Amino acid sequence: MEPGPGEGGAAGAVHFHGDEEIIEVVELGPPGPDDLANEMEDVDFDEEAIQGAEEQAWETEEEDEGVEDGMEAQDDSEVTFSEHSASVFCVSLDPTTNTLAVTGGEDDKAFVWRLSDGERLFECSGHKDSVTCAGFSHDSMFVATGDMSGLIKVWQVDMKKEIWSFDVGDLEWMEWHPQAHVLLAGTADGNSWMWKIPSGECKTFQGPSCPATCGRVLPDGKRAVVGYEDGTVRIWDLKQGSSLHVLKGQDGHQGPLTCVTSNKDGSLVMTGSVDCHAKLVNSATGKVVCVFKMESAASKSPAGEAESNSVESLGFCNVMPLAAVGYLDGTLAIYDISTQSLRQRCQHESGIVQLLWEDGAAVVYTCSLDGAVRLWDARSGKLISEYRGHSAEILDFAVNKDASIVVTTSGDHQAKVFCVQRPDR
């Protein structure tokens, strides 16, 4: 059996004792200038496939819904989109104007609609399973929708018509290339796919024989990082179709990957897993720079209760050397990359589904299973504001470029638009 990332070979371990958790940062050698990004550029956070752990948490959450009828009383949203007839799993905003949203749901439907008034532009019809992935191309010309069975469709937005479709088998994640009309996706058989749109010219990247659970194209557009159910991570050369680095064993995770992301210039990759570890990786060398490790007090509980904590979402700050990690137990941890230490811990009462950093500030947005969106000051760890309006858990959200609008999707069959007022600007 491979030793865990915290065992053996670690130069030193620093323990942080909190009220409920113990957070351990394992340093794997001093960071060199190449390891840490000095400048940060935009990273488009578009977390994709829904994790089994999250689904279990949602189910438990639904059982408690009766108690939380009060959730419905407060509605801070400006616009509500109500055309879905079941849980709304995913949302993405058009990157060029930030005036359109695409949402996909458990009703096998996806819609493109206007943020200003919730007016439907068109339905992305023809899916036969829950639409779990949806997103606009970098120039907002196309929108792609993908369902769990693996049917992917691409629509030309101005014509409101389908221009391409392909069936890949069970879909885990899907993402547009940051600079080109190229679509990438990962599937349950371990493959990652890349297509030119609309020609459909295709390339595949064969991973291990287990699901490719998450993926992200790096900002240079030449590489992609993909995480797998067996705990391994691969950095792929998109042009050559070959893997540049494989992280496995002690360098990989001890459980399925849930999320991957990169910093602004792509020099650092961060990976998260159900093993509750987040790893910082130098994307050029494939070496693990450090491991952020959290143990919840619940994991030490007697009677062998199942521990269900995991890393659900990750992100890098663009303006300071900070990273945020969101956990299923409701912990938002802010780590200082330069010192590789815990800086703040912000506790939510229920699990974090996703987090996003504001583009030009040290502010983290979280959405959680209690149906609220929260803004946190990453420097102080203090809650800036909270927005409510959903009567069930939030399943996905997006923030527009100037951080004035948050769009959420929920198990209450609705998508909502919130105008975010920040007192400090």
Image (cartoon, rainbow, N blue to C red):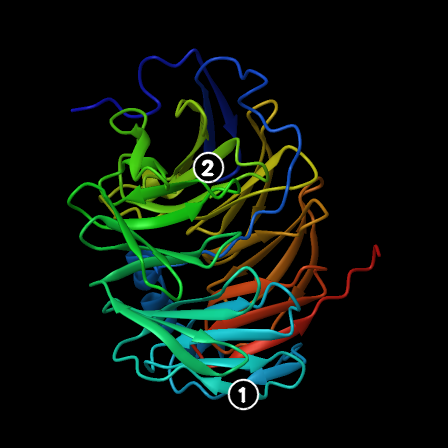
Helix or strand or loop: what does disc 1 sit on? Answer: strand
Q: Position of residue 391 (x, y in %)?
A: 50, 78
Q: Mark 1 points at which residue?
A: 120
Displayed quadrant of residue 343? top right
Image depth: mark 2 or mark 1 in front: 1
Q: Can residue 389 be seen here?
A: no
Say if residue 381 shows up in the picture.
Answer: yes
Please tell me in which quadrant of the rendered image residue 9 appears: top left
- Please name whichever residue, 82 or 118, is drawn nearer the observer in this view of the structure: 118
Callout count: 2
Amino acid at dot 2: Met
Q: Distance from label 2 to label 1 (Cα)?
A: 36 Å
Residue at the spot x=31%, y=19% of the render? 7
Residue 421: x and y in percent read 77, 65
Answer with left or right where residue 81 lies relative to residue 28: right
Residue at 48 percent of width and 52 percent of height? 330
137, 333: nearer the viewer: 137
In this view, the residue in front, 206 or 390, is 206
Q: Name the residue under label 2.
A: 270
**The N terminus is located in which quarter?**
top left
Label 2: few (<14), some or many (≥20) within 10 Å?
many
Q: Where is residue 157 in the image (x, y as percent from the top left)?
A: 51, 77
Q: Circle 1: is it few (<14), some (14-19), or many (20+) Cα within 10 Å?
A: some
Q: Which amino acid does label 1 sit on?
A: Arg
Q: Residue at x 41, y 52 (%)?
A: 328
**Rendered position, 296 above or below 397:** above
Is label 2 in a helix, a strand or a loop? strand
Which mark sits nearer the N-terminus, 2 or 1? Answer: 1
